[in-house]
Structure formats: C-alpha cells, structure tokens
Image (tube, helix red, strand yellow):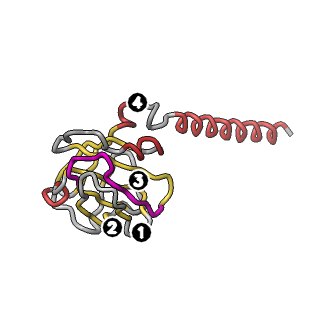
Amino acid sequence: MKRSSDSTLRTFGKAMALVLAASLLLSCSTTGGQAGDRFKAVRIGRETFYLEVAADDESRRAGLSGREELAASAGMLFLFEEPQEVAFWMKDTSIPLSLAWVDSTGRITGITDLVPDSLEPVYSPGAVIAAIELNQGAFTRAGARLLDRVLIDGIGHD
C-alpha cells in the first residue's frame, strides 16, 4: 500500500510541477516580458534581421504605422497563435515595405511589395503563422525566395 501512495504522490508532484512551469511560461507575454520577447533574430535568405515582435491584437494593429524610417536590418514580425488567413493594409505607414507570409512549416508562401499609406487590403495566400515586414526590396537583397525556410530565434516549426 505504501508503494502505491508514494507513486501517486510522485506522479501528482510531477503534474503540479508541469502546471507551474506552464503557468510561468504563459505569464511571460510579448508585451510584458523581457526584451528578448519584444525582438527576435530572424534568418531570411543570406541575412539576419532583428525584428520587433507583434504578437497581440494591439501591437499587430499598430504595426509600423507612424514611423518615419526603418533601419536596414530591422522590421516587424507579426505572430499568430494559430495558422489563419489574414490581411494587412498600410494605413498611416509611409515607409515603403515588403511583406512575406510564413506558413506553419516556417516557409515563405508569398512576398509582396506594399504601397505606402494604402488602405487596400493585402491578403495572405493561405493560412499563415507569421508575416514579416521589411524595408522594400530587403527580401530580394537577402536572396529570399518562395518556399525558403525562415529561421526565427526561439520558435520551432512543424
């Protein structure tokens, strides 16, 4: 009988430790976490970019609007909780940008140039887990092509 209760206590303790660890991970949100949560190193083609992360509705809605310039190795990484079809526009964004769509395998499924200050929506070519905005032409200069894998620091892909 003692052996059974010791085993039950060990199992319960492991389960509680997993619940605690999951709670701690979930509490480190992008907006309230450390600087590493707000910026990610992303390998695209031959280059590494340092992208600001937009992982909640508020930061995704704001995007890069209102900015006057963007460093050559900078941009924005829009992350979505689940693969989904999404649309972007360039309201109040005067910087010429290019946008790449990334699917759940981490591959680029489309790259398009965006028109500054345009209110016309630009739709993803299917379900995506991420979208990346860089200065216009940066994907081409980095040698990025359709179906290339994008390597996002700290994020694995299916």
- Quadrant of the rendering where the N terminus is positioned: top right
Label 3 belongs to which residue?
156
Lateral position of residue 15 relative to residue 97, left or right: right
How far, Cα to Cα, is label 1 from label 2? 8 Å
Lateral position of residue 15 relative to residue 66, left or right: right
Instruction: Say above or below: 94 vs 125.
Output: above
Label 1 belongs to which residue?
126
Circle 4 Cα neighbour tier, 10 Å, few/some/many (<14 / 14–19 / ≥20) = few
- In the rendered structure, which segment of residues is drawn in magenta? 84-97
Residue 63: image location, x then y, percent: 35, 45
Residue 10: image location, x then y, percent: 71, 37
Name the residue rendered at 66%, 39% in the picture. Answer: 14
Considering depth in this image, is 55 or 20 the residue closer to the camera? 55
Residue 157: image location, x then y, percent: 41, 58
Name the residue rendered at 31%, 43% in the picture. Answer: 65
Label 4 belongs to which residue?
34
Judge depth for marks 3 and 1 and give the one in front.
1
Of mark 3 and mark 1, the one earlier in the sequence is 1
Q: Chief secondary structure of the magenta span?
A: loop
Q: Give the residue type at disc 4.
A: Gln
Q: Are marks 1 and 2 in contact (CB under 8 Å)?
A: yes
Of mark 1 and mark 4, the one earlier in the sequence is 4
Of mark 3 and mark 4, the one earlier in the sequence is 4
Label of residue 109 in the image = 2
Name the residue rendered at 20%, 52% in the picture. Answer: 96
